Amino acid sequence: MALAFSSYPACNQHPQEVFDYVMKNKKAMPRTALRYAIELMPEELKAEAMMKDW
């Protein structure tokens, strides 16, 4: 299967899937990667993703 380039970030096309992935893996992600992954999400999802839960 060929991958097509999309000028739209994944969080715009699949916001719930990206959010679920971030929430599942955020403890292992560098903080910079986490912030980059959520930068285009709505504010309420950003706030939830940035909350420390460890």
Image: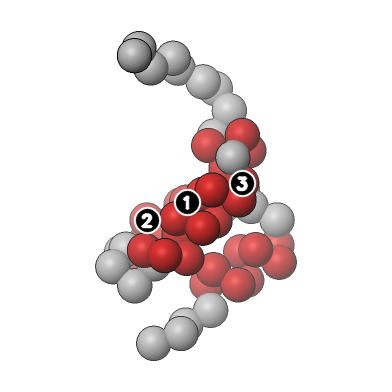
Q: Position of residue 2 (x, y in %)?
A: 35, 12
Q: Please rate how many residues cluster around mark 2, counting C-alpha atoms within 10 Å: few if below 14, some from 14 to 19, many from 20.
A: few
CB under 8 Å between discs 2 and 3 = no
The residue at which mark 1 appears reads as: 37
Name the amino acid, label 2. Ala
Towards the viewer: 52 or 18: 18
Q: How far is the residue under mark 2 from the one under mark 1?
A: 6 Å
Name the amino acid, label 3. Pro
Q: Secondary structure at mark 3?
A: helix
The residue at which mark 2 appears reads as: 33
The residue at which mark 3 appears reads as: 15
Q: Secondary structure at mark 1?
A: helix
Q: Looking at the picture, does residue 51 appear above or below residue 49?
A: below
Name the amino acid, label 1. Ala
Q: Earlier in the sequence, mark 1 or mark 3?
A: 3
In this rendering, the label closer to the viewer, 1 or 3: 3
Q: Earlier in the sequence, mark 2 or mark 3?
A: 3
Q: Residue at x 60, y 50 (%)?
A: 16
CB under 8 Å between discs 1 and 3 = no
CB under 8 Å between discs 2 and 1 = yes
Q: Position of residue 52 (x, y in %)?
A: 47, 82
